[in-house]
Image (cartoon, rainbow, N blue to C red):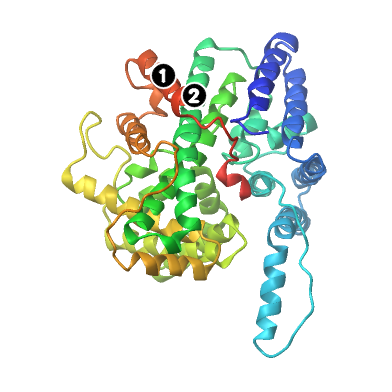
Amino acid sequence: MLFNSLDFAIFLPIVFILYWFVVGKNVKAQNILLVGASYVFYSWWDWRFLFLILFSTLVNYGVGLLLTKEKKRSRRKLYLFISVLTNIGLLGFFKYFNFFLENFVEAFSFFGMSFKTTTLDIILPVGISFYTFQTLSYTIDIYKKKLEATNNFIAFMAFVSFFPQLVAGPIERAVHFLPQFFTKRTFKKEQAIIGIKQIIWGLFKKLVIADSCAQYASEIFDNYQEYSSATLVLGVFYFAVRIYGDFSGYCDIAIGTARLFDFKLTTNFRYPFFSRNIAEYWRRWNITLSSWFRDYIFFPLGGSRVSRYKTIINVMIVFLISGFWHGASWNFIFWGFICGLLYVVFSFKSKKKHSYVTVNPNTLPSIRAFFEISLVFVCMAFTRIFFRTTSMEEAFSYLRQIAEFSIQLDYLGIYRYSVELIPLILVMLWLEWYSRNKEFPLFSVKPEILKTSMIILFILLFGNFEEVKQFYYFRF
């Protein structure tokens, strides 16, 4: 079930009414309702996926209890290994089986050996990359004694399957999120209003910005051989804006929806387009995933407490794994490598660190700040070429065509908002710039009613209601 679908527009009010006005203030009943609603929500794609998420829930719930009771270190390691093997095994099979099989065959064919193999027609379960990381962090934290396992299976089911953030994050830690399923929830009008505004802002970024940019980006990337260098650069810009509007829009809707049920999800984006260096960009972009890699991979490798050379190696390992997490292809691995390389160059070139509020909140950026922000945006946007293309060969072909330096912009035969799109993107950036020290724009920009009404009008006028487009990160 998609947030931007009519199905969800009917589903959400029904769950909301049942949650507050039928089961009332009974925490257990609310949790049972959330589990039922989440399983209905998830089964909308394919009901068979329910068995997978239930299996993951059962294994990690059981491992958590065993880890809490067990004192012997060797057995605790064994239980943790079972959890890691289960989570990574499920993810590896559904997401990476064909990739490893194909590369295994190619590696042996290089030495003149041939194998007859058949790839499997595997359907990637929606959200598996997200909920496996969430459950894995639960057992790891219990193993490290940062958390005690819960005996409440219903609450744990609700934690794993909570529908607002189930399929694309934010990736919540049990330390922060699980206790919310045990506390009494009460309806708060102010929080509900904030939640609705955040949903509206997320729908604006998805329906108006991302879906419109997607049409132009797809036209250019899918037919890049026919277009000039300038048009290909425009395609890079459209795709960079598209993926931000799409993913951050999803997270805004998820966080806003959670507020309606008196839950607090972790902020996953903090205006990354205003970053002044690459390190700051990754502190602002997909924050919960970045922090997951930091805490469970980078720090155990030694973090930055080791030599400078080893620190660089650790950073590169994290980015390579991050690239592979995004997709089972060499494109994504190389994307991770490029991002890691940029991170190292920008981070070790200067010891100066920039805060999130780069200049006075009420002013435009200085010339230097504007240059730094633009440089970071351009660098990260061009790495997305490897994110969007389907092969390494296609990515480098795209780059070679840009290198021809033809400055004539081609006409794109797309009716959808060819004139209005750039101003709409500027509206989004303007609202975010003047709200960058707040959680999200419609909560802070004055007057709130006027700005919210303007965004609703933009959604009605320019929103893509003709075709319900899936969120981009669902494929990961």
Task: Identify the residue position indicated by label 1 in the image.
Answer: 452
**Residue type, numbered disc 1:** Thr
- The disc label shown at residue 345, or none: none
104 w.r.t. 168: above or below = below
Callout 2: SS? helix
Q: Which residue has dot 2 on it?
A: 200
* Residue 294 left/right relative to 154: left
Residue flagged by tag 2: what amino acid is it? Ile
| N-term-proximal mark, 2 vs 1 | 2
Between the C-alphas of marks 2 and 1, the distance is 8 Å
Q: Is residue 336 left or right of residue 277?
A: right
User: Mark 2 touching mark 1, by CB under 8 A?
Assistant: yes
The image position of residue 350, as x and y in percent, is: 26, 59
Task: Check disc 1 and report its element: helix, strand or loop.
Answer: helix
Q: Residue at x 77, y 41 (%)?
A: 46
Whole-percent x and y of residue 290?
Answer: 50, 49
